[in-house]
Image (cartoon, rainbow, N blue to C red):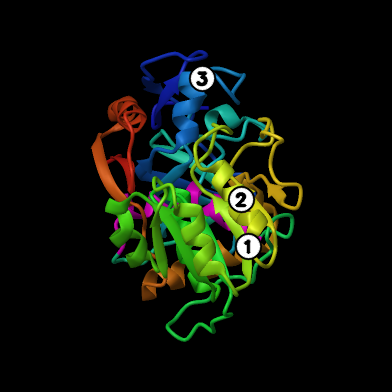
Amino acid sequence: MSTSQNEAAWLNAKQARPLSVGPAPMRTPDSNEVVVRVHAVSINPVDAFIQSMGVIVQDYPYILGTDVAGVITAVGASVTNFKVGDRVLAETDGADPSVPDARGRGAFQLYTAANHMLTAKIPDGVSFKEASVLPLCFCTAAAALYETTSLGLPLPQVGKNISKKGEVFVVWGVGSAVGANAVQMAKASGYDVIATCSEHNFEFAKNLGADYAFDYKKDSVVEDVLGILNGKKCVGVLAAMVGFNPNAPGLDQCGEIASKAQGRHYLATVIPATMEIPNDFPKNIEIGRTWGTTIKHSEVGRYLFHDWIPAALADGTLKCAPDTEVSGQGLESVQGALDRWSQGVSAKKIVVEIL
C-alpha cells in the first residue's frame, strides 16, 4: 500500500524512545470501520506504560495511542450511521494487540481506522481537542458501570429530568480521566455520587455532578464516606485511579468501603486481567476488572457511542472532562506529551493537536 499520504509516530522497538515520526500505510476501512483524519489525540496511561515498561505490545514497530478526534474520510461497507465529512471522536485499537494488524491501528498517525461501534459524532460546538479527551477513559468507566459482567447498572439518559434512584455510587479518584467520566455517567443513570479527590479538585468534582467530595488523603476518608452511606444503598465502588499499579494507595480503602456499605459489595477496578490483585481484601466483596474496548462487542457500546454521547454532549449532560492541556502540535510533539503525562497530572488530559 502507498505510504505517501500518511505518517505516524512509531515505537520502533520495546521501550524505544523517542518515538520516530515516519511514513505509515494509508488505512483503508474494514467493513465495520471508519477512517478518520486525525486532528487531535490525547495521552492515556496505557500509552506511557507500553513505552516505558514494555508491556502489552510484543510486535514492533508499533503505533501507540487510542484516543482521537477528527473527520471521517472513508467508511466501511457495513457502516450505515456515518458518512465522509462527519466530525467524530473515536477509540482505536492502539492498546489491543489481539486485533489483527494492531500495530498499525493506533491513534498517533495522520489517518487511522476505528470500529464504528466506538465512534461518536460530536456537535459543532465541541472542538477536536476537547473531544479527544473522552474515548478510552469513557469506555473504561462505561465498561465498569454498565457491562453485565461488571456492575450492570441502568444505561444513562439525557436531560434535566432524569429520575433519581435514591441509591449511591462511589468513585475513588475523580481527578483521573476515568473517574471524571464515571461521575457523569452515574449521575445520568440517576445515582447520587460520592467522589474522592484532592481537596483542590473539589470544585471540579462538583461541577461534574458529584453530590459529595472527600479528600482521599485524609485519615478519616473511609469513615467520612461510610457516614454518608449510612442508611443508604450503595450500588458499587469504582477505584478509578489504580491502573497498572495494583498496589496503588487507595485500593485498600475502596475495599473497606465496598465491604462495609449497605447494598452490593462490589469493587470495580481498572486493573488489567494480566496483573495480580492483592488477595487480602474482605471476603464479602466482589472485585471486577475492566478493559474499556470490551463495550464494542455489546449493546452498551452501540447505545453510548451512537445515541448517548452525541445527545449528551449537545445538551450538556456530558462534559469533555478532564480539561485539556495542549502539549504541542504535530506528531513530533507526541513524545513530549508522553513525557509530560509521566511527570504527573490531576484533573487534566494531555492533548496534541494534529493540524
Residue occupying image coordinates x 63% and y 55%: 258
Q: Which span of residues is magenta-colored?
A: 126-146
Q: Mainly helix, strand or loop, the magenta region?
A: helix
User: Residue 104, position in %: x, y?
Assistant: 53, 29
Q: Position of residue 278 (x, y in %)?
A: 67, 33
* Residue 124 coordinates in the image, percent (x, y): 31, 66
Q: Tell whether label 1 touches label 2 (CB within 8 Å).
A: no
Q: Where does label 2 land, which residue?
A: 256
The answer to whether residue 210 shows anywhere in this view is no
Q: Is residue 210 left or right of residue 79?
A: left
Which residue does the numbered mark 3 point to in the structure image? 53
Residue type of the residue flagged with mark 3: Met
Q: Which residue is mark 1?
A: 261
Secondary structure at numbered mark 3: helix
Kindly indicate whether the residue at mark 3 contacts the one at mark 1 (C-beta within 8 angstroms).
Answer: no
Amino acid type at image mark 1:
Ala
> x and y percent of residue 68 in the render?
42, 45
Looking at the image, which residue is at 44% across and 22% down? 10
Magenta stretch: includes residue 128: yes
Q: Is residue 65 above or below residue 175?
A: above
The disc labelled 2 sits on which kind of residue? Answer: Glu
Mark 2 or 1 closer to N-term? 2
